[in-house]
Image: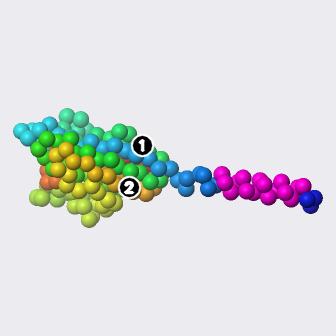
């Protein structure tokens, strides 16, 4: 190999190295989540949880989780969570869904999702009205359910789905 060819090869190798260093290992994205409700005198629902009989009516629910986007790329996802309620504590828990028809384990006596059984990936727990918190999770491709597990809230429509792909 000629000396010139060798020098060129070294230069190209160095350039490739710099390019690799500047490329993030995987995507990082941010999702804003608003935990909202209709106020202290709202009527709670019983069957608007994900997979429940009136899940489709969650658009008319007394409370909910509004996301800035419903799809993000694979990688680190940061959730910026704000409780916009004036009088109620809310939280946001992230769980994976094996498929859209997965039944979320629910304790109807306690009126809450069975978190341990459901597979809790992380959460911003119990935010006071007006408070904010954040959570960053490395998420693989798949479907995720975000929900509030203050008793009665999941069944009142306080959930959202997020697709990672
Ligand atoms: Cu809640």
Question: On the picture, is 39 further left or further right than 122?
Answer: left
Give the SS element for disc 1: strand
Residue at the farthest right position: 2
**Label ID, residue 18:** none
Query: Which residues lie in the magenta part?
Result: 4-19
Locate residue 4: give its quadrant. bottom right
Locate residue 85: give its quadrant. top left
Which mark sits nearer the N-terminus, 1 or 2? 1
Q: Nearer the viewer, residue 140 or 14?
A: 14
Q: Is mark 2 within 8 Å of ligand 1?
A: no
Q: Main secondary structure of the magenta part?
A: helix
Residue 121 on image: x %, y %: 34, 60
- Residue 136 visible in the snapshot: yes
Quadrant (top left/top right/bottom left/bottom right) for the N terminus: bottom right
Magenta span has 5? yes
Magenta span has 151? no
Question: On the picture, is 3 further left or further right than 116?
Answer: right
Give me the residue at 64% from left, 55% from top. Answer: 20
Give me the residue at 32% from left, 59% from top. Answer: 122
Question: On the picture, is 94 further left or further right than 77?
Answer: left
Residue 128 on image: x %, y %: 17, 50
Give the SS element for disc 2: strand
Residue at the farthest left position: 41
Q: Nearer the viewer, residue 14 or 62?
A: 14
Query: Which residue is under mark 1?
Result: 71
Q: Nearer the viewer, residue 53 or 124?
A: 124
Quote the CA–CA distance across marks 1 and 2.
16 Å
Query: Which residue is under mark 2?
Result: 136
């Amino acid at each position: 190999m000629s000396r010139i060819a060798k020098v060129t090869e070294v230069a190209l190798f160095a350039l490739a190295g710099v390019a690799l260093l500047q490329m993030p290992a995987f995507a990082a994205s941010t999702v804003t989540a608003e935990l909202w409700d209709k106020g202290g005198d709202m009527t709670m629902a019983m069957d608007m949880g994900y997979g429940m009989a009136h899940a489709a009516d969650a658009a008319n629910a007394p409370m909910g989780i509004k996301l800035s986007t419903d799809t993000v790329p694979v990688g680190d996802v940061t959730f910026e969570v704000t409780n916009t309620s004036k009088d109620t504590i809310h939280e946001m828990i992230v769980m994976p869904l094996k498929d859209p028809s997965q039944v979320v384990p629910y304790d109807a006596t306690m009126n809450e999702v069975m978190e341990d059984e459901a597979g809790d990936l992380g959460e911003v727990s119990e935010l006071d009205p007006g408070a904010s918190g954040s959570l960053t999770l490395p998420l693989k491709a798949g479907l995720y359910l975000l929900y509030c597990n203050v008793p009665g809230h999941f069944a009142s429509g306080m959930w959202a789905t997020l697709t990672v792909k």
